Image (cartoon, rainbow, N blue to C red):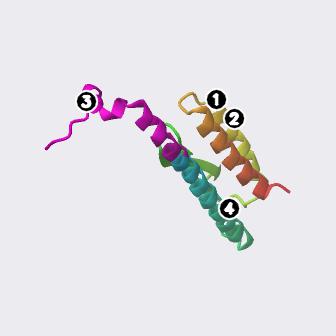
Amino acid sequence: MAVVNVRAAAQPAWLDVSRAEASMPAVTMTSEQGRELARLQVQEMIRKVQTRAREHRLDRGLTVSLPYFDDGAQELRWRELVIIPRGRIPFVPAFVVLAARQEIEHVLAEAGLSEATQAHLVELLQALAGAFAS
């Protein structure tokens, strides 16, 4: 004997409101986990840059790939940030602060990012700037 769900036959499962509401916490959790992963990767990147700065291995330029979680795409993405152009410019921590502040302005002006993604990116850039401000 086959059991037929009349409601399911009348409406596709992906339109079911209760199903959408049930999946929302999973999406929120995914976003939170993605943001946390990006924060951890930024902290690791900061440690590496600080170590290389102490060893004077950053005097030929510095470009970092800043990870962030894009809410719209639901994926981890990378943003290239040129702190010191290639060449023989000695590393100065203030360059990181200036580059991060400039990138914050670009992020806030970028229309393609959601408010949550912008806030997340600004938070990461502020952490980067804060690690080198003194």
Q: Provide the residue designation for mark 1.
A: 109
Query: Residue 91: horizontal and vertical position, in percent?
Result: 73, 60
Query: Residue 22: horizontal and vertical position, in percent?
Result: 47, 41
Quadrant where the N terminus lies? top left
Residue that protrudes farthest toward the bottom in the picture:
55
Q: Provide the residue designation for mark 3.
A: 6
The amino acid at mark 2 is Glu
**SS for tag 1?**
helix
The amino acid at mark 1 is Ala
The amino acid at mark 4 is Ile
User: Which residue is depicted at the point 71% across and 53% down?
Assistant: 128
The amino acid at mark 3 is Val
Q: Provide the residue designation for mark 4.
A: 46
Q: Provide the residue designation for mark 2.
A: 105
Instruction: Please report whichever mark, 4 or 3, sits nearer to the chain's N-terminal start.
Output: 3
**Badge 1: how crowded within 10 Å, few (<14), some, or many (20+)?**
few
State yes or no: discs 2 and 4 in contact (Cβ < 8 Å): no
Q: Nearer the viewer, residue 43 or 129?
A: 43
